[in-house]
Image (cartoon, rainbow, N blue to C red):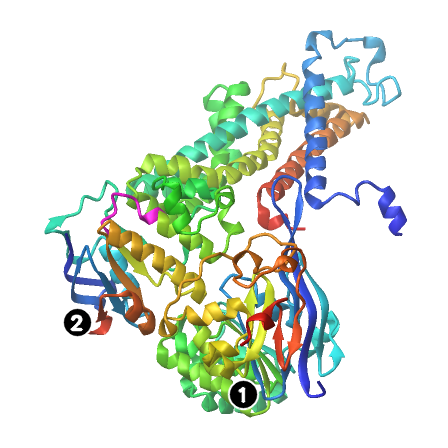
Amino acid sequence: MSSLSKLNPLNSMNLRQKTILLIGLIVLLLVLVYASSLSIDPANILTDFTLRNQPPSFEHLFGTDWLGRDMLTRTIKGLGLSIFIGAVASILSSILAIIMAFISSVNKYGDVLIAWLIDFFASIPHLLLLIMISICLGKGAMGVIIGVACTHWTSLARVLRVEIKEIQTSEYVQLSEKFGKNKFWIAKEHILILVITQVIVGTLLIFPHAIMHEASITFLGFGLSPHEPAIGIILSESMSYLTTGAWWLAVFPGVMLLIIVLLFDILGEEVEKLLDPTKAQK
Amino acid sequence: MYLNANNISYAYKKNKPILKNLSISIPDNKVIGLMGDSGSGKSTLCKVISGYIKNYTGTVTLDNNLIETKDFYPIQLIFQHPEKTMNPKWKMHKVLSESWNPPQELMDTFGLKDNWLGRWPNELSGGELQRFSILRALNPKTKFIIADEISTMLDAVTQVQIWDALLDYCKQNKIGILAVSHDKELLEVIADDILLFNEINKL
Amino acid sequence: MENDLLTVQNVSISFTQYVQGLQQHILKVISDLSLSVKEGEVVAILGSSGSGKSLLAHAILGILPENGQCDGTISFKGEVLTQEKKEELRGEHICLIPQSVNFLDPLMKVREQAIGDVKDEEKEKALKHQKEIFEKYGLAEEVGDMYPFELSGGMARKVLLSTALLSDPELVVADEPTPGLDQASVNETINDIKRLAQEGKGVLLITHEIDVALKTADRIAIFYSGYVIEINKAENFNDVNKLLHPYTKSLIEALPRNGFKLTSGVQPLEEVDGCPYFENCPIRSDICQNNKPDLIDHNGIMIRCHNFDKEVN
């Protein structure tokens, strides 16, 4: 048993090294998907009517659609777009959360306002608000990104607001004021370094939501326009062909989307383990 | 210079005052000991005098002048638990230099080792951290030190070391000390005068 | 040795921690600790707060955190304690008086917590017993109906004490029972602990307050930088000349009533090769730098020093 465990390099690593390895692998995978999607020019996805609705084969791993286009290429292009929109939306959403948390920390009125805003945004169903914002902004990538950002900042803002409040009442911040430091200096030097972990993890954990919501509202027709190579579009198109037995049109893109979402979810949790020492002492 | 707290009253809950009409005067060349049991309100008084609690009634003055709150506060409080007064994500050199950069000689007097400066607060013991928090409070702008049970959690040897260094520095630099403790024997050794908290607090 | 209730032999407790980046670091908190507690005896472990001495209590009860490791042997009535055995004994034969009320469930009335989880038919008996014990330690009956946050410091201490004693344990481990109490409550706690010993129980008292140790204990173990450097009878602490280790001497001389004598030097942060007190020791010699002294028996006094007899008279 012991000789076996020596042979397996995974066993000789401590938890933190394993975590980093896992994070590295996931990031590599995601970058690979994104990079390969960039290298695909949608104009080059060949339309070949002799290859219409082919089931999966070695030549076309994910099969082909009703225009004879390779579904694997289309799926990867769509995933790339999903990752891009997810990234922009979650970063925007975190920035929004930071601004909100900052305003709430300035004074009592700011805090009441932000607390009300958080409750307000959190009480409306995500999807409904998202669709409304997206339609208002004329759909498209812009509408989806702003929509996702506006609906997903609340949970991170809530965490940050509480965290900042706790730090502000700590003895070291009160002492810092007695050393004559101003509020801005304290925010920059004391508070930022303590909440940066939550911000990074929070951003990563918004990612999967952003991707899922983008796909769902696009699927429903309120998101990206039909000529974009998005997963939501692929899925909604495939609906009309499912009855004819072309199952591969929905299954492969759907499963791939799920895998990407799961990867981001795991990534967020692993990074949290790495940054939060209370979870890493093993 | 005199630190005067006049007619201080304060209540955490309405109608349940913890400090009432309390007055105390501390000269800059003396150590005034204040003795009282835990939970009697000593720490509250310390926080009022050093500006941590603001909505009290009465006045705290330095030579009859009110104290400017935006600048470095000339009355510095040293807490019982030093670990709570340090940002856990700051290394010790930053913790210390937030207030000032003391000369090497003073660091030696307080027994601060150079290699402690590169450590995080949780890598040092309470006694070592307390040395930092005392030295940090001894900024040249400090006129008075309020020491709230600062050696209660320390062993007897460390207790002598930090009081010896603190008393010595304050005598040389004309810094007055209010030493608050429940330990009568300690106050008898370090203080010039001893006040009983229950006598000056007119509850 | 026969009537030893608790025997701790060569116990070391360490933690695995991440220091920086990927390195794991083993942090030794208690090194090579040996001591024993007899029936009817109070043994105090005296060390500065935060020095990790509470971990010995946790090790005896088998409640160390996951990343903690305990080497050496702990035996109870001559039987070596395994984790299973500790779990079996704790709460029944070995009880802990914890540091603070935070160990109580804040949402449960004191009485319910004291009697714990008992079957309905036994409940009446348990309640009666709880009433007796509470009365014995001067707790009014209505205290049982209070929630932990309603208790004052002194009362909370009594609740923790009587709760630990409900099962009539043979060994009581008291972890820092006095901080934050007024003098009257401290004295009461001291008396309560002494009474336990008179009833034949063994008490291991863990404290950083030297006066509490002196007033309560029969023997006192001095803890320095993770090592027990001397275990001496409590009465010997009244006379510096009867103390063997130079650190113990300076500790006693540093007390305000004994002259508030200054000894410089700090406890080493890192594990050292030789004697942990080498850097600050007035009687050190070459052997001390690289050789760790063992804890040896010198006429009933345990001492960890190469040169202790040099200075004795």
The segment highlighted magenta reads B136-144
Cα distance in 3D space between marks 2 and 1:
40 Å
- Letter of the chain that mark 1 sits on in the rendering: C
Alpha-carbon neighbours of circle 2 within 10 Å: few (<14), some, or many (≥20)? some
Q: Secondary structure at mark 2?
A: loop
Badge 1 is on which residue?
C196
Badge 2 is on which residue?
B202
Quarter residue A98 falls in: top left
Marks 2 and 1: which is nearer the front? 1
Q: What residue is drawn where x is 84% and y is 42%?
A: A8
- Letter of the chain that mark 2 sits on in the rendering: B
Q: Left or right of A133: which side holds A75?
A: right
- Count of number-bearing discs: 2
Quarter residue B58 falls in: bottom left
Please say whether residue B139 is one of the residues in the magenta stretch.
Answer: yes
Give the amino acid at mark 2: Lys
Residue B92 x %, y %: 46, 44
Residue situated in front as seen by the camera: A170 or C176: C176
Residue C153 x %, y %: 40, 74
Residue A94 x %, y %: 49, 32
